[in-house]
């Protein structure tokens, strides 16, 4: 007999430097696993800061995720976004453009 573990959902938390599970965190969201390499980030109370987003990207890449999606709602307008993650991206790069790299928008709903 064989068994297969399917990851359906996770929680991602961002800590300040040196933080670990059980410590206070600065950002938290649910992560819905769509398949072994794709996730949808849901249930965030607010948008992550640039440094939080870099930490999220690094954690997803480390877990083998290559595509992350999320829906943004601003002024009542929904827009879907897709972020392609690559292992060789410079995840520590500072600046706004680096944080937006790889983001693709789909049609607004």
Image: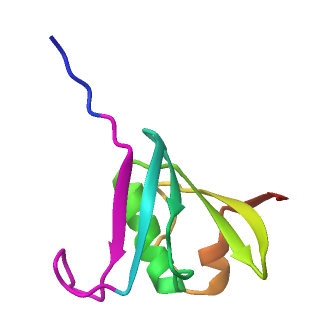
Residue span colored magenta: 6-25
Q: Residue furthest front?
A: 76
Res 73 → quadrant: bottom right
- Is residue 93 on the magenta stretch? no
Q: Would you say the magenta stretch is mainly helix, strand or loop?
A: loop
Q: Residue at x 50, y 73 (%)?
A: 44
Where residue 99 sits: x, y (%)?
60, 76
Q: Nearer the viewer, residue 63 or 93?
A: 63
Q: Residue at x 44, y 58 (%)?
A: 31
Q: Residue at x 50, y 68 (%)?
A: 43
| Relative height, residue 60 to residue 13 (above, below) | above
Q: Is residue 93 left or right of residue 14?
A: right
Res 101 → quadrant: bottom right
Image quarter hosting the N terminus = top left
Q: Is residue 107 left or right of residue 49?
A: right
Where residue 54 sits: x, y (%)?
47, 75
Q: Residue at x 26, y 26 (%)?
A: 4
Where residue 23 sits: x, y (%)?
19, 84
Image quarter hosting the C terminus = bottom right
Res 24 → quadrant: bottom left
- Is residue 17 on the magenta stretch? yes
């Amino acid at each position: 007999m064989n068994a297969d573990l399917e990851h359906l959902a996770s929680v991602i938390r961002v800590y300040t430097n040196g933080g670990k599970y059980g410590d206070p965190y600065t950002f938290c969201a649910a992560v819905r696993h769509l398949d072994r390499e794709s996730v949808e980030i849901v249930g965030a109370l607010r948008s992550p800061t640039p440094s939080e987003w870099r930490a999220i990207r690094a954690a997803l890449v480390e877990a083998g995720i290559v595509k992350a999606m999320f829906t943004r709602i601003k002024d009542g307008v929904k827009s879907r976004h897709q972020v392609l993650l690559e292992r060789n991206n410079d995840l520590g790069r500072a600046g706004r453009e680096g944080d937006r790299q790889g983001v693709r928008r789909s049609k607004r709903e």
